[in-house]
Image: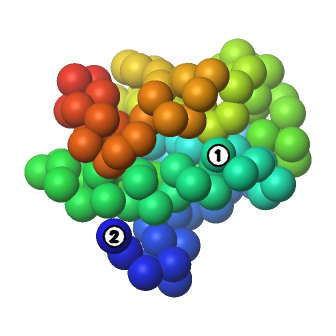
Amino acid sequence: MLARNAEQKLFMILEQQIKLEELISSSESPVLAVFSAPGCGPSRLLDAVLADAISHLPQKPQIVRIDSEQNSALSDRYQVHALPTLLIFKNGQLIGRIEEERIEDLLPAAHLLQRLQAIL
């Protein structure tokens, strides 16, 4: 797994809906939006697992972390209820979502990798 500072570099943090919409519509690579919250233990746990899973994908998506508490309008728009929730966009369209009630369903990284590969 990647060191903590490398994991943090993996994520781009967006704080405005407009920036997310611009990124989704202009990106040539898939965009993986990770809805999380700073105080959410499962969200922090997912960071390392996600970094490991992404390292095995042939086409690396752009990854953005969205604080669902600070961006409730985005959470509402995309009907994000459980944290963390991963939304995958390609060619400006939402093509998949990974939303589990239990973080254990996304562990280990191989499980998450399989889910991402099926969508991408």
Residue 51, quarter of picture: bottom left
Coordinates of residue 2 in the picture (x, y in percent): 37, 75
Residue 84 relative to residue 40: left or right: left
| Residue where numbered disc 1 is placed | 42
Q: Amino acid at mark 2?
A: Met
Residue 102, quarter of picture: top right
Neighbour class for label 1 at 10 Å: few (<14), some, many (≥20)? some
Coordinates of residue 107 in the picture (x, y in percent): 41, 41
Between marks 2 and 1, how big is the CA–CA gap?
17 Å
Q: Earlier in the sequence, mark 2 or mark 1?
A: 2
Residue 75 relative to residue 45: left or right: right
Q: Is residue 120 visible?
A: no
Residue 81, quarter of picture: top right
23, 59: nearer the viewer: 59
Coordinates of residue 111 in the picture (x, y in percent): 30, 35
Q: Amino acid at mark 1?
A: Pro
Give the total of numbered labels. Answer: 2
| Residue where numbered disc 2 is placed | 1
114, 72: nearer the viewer: 114
Establish if 119 lies above or below 57: above
On residue 79, which mark appears? none
Residue 88 relative to residue 84: left or right: left
Coordinates of residue 77 in the picture (x, y in percent): 73, 20
Establish if 70 lies above or below 76: below
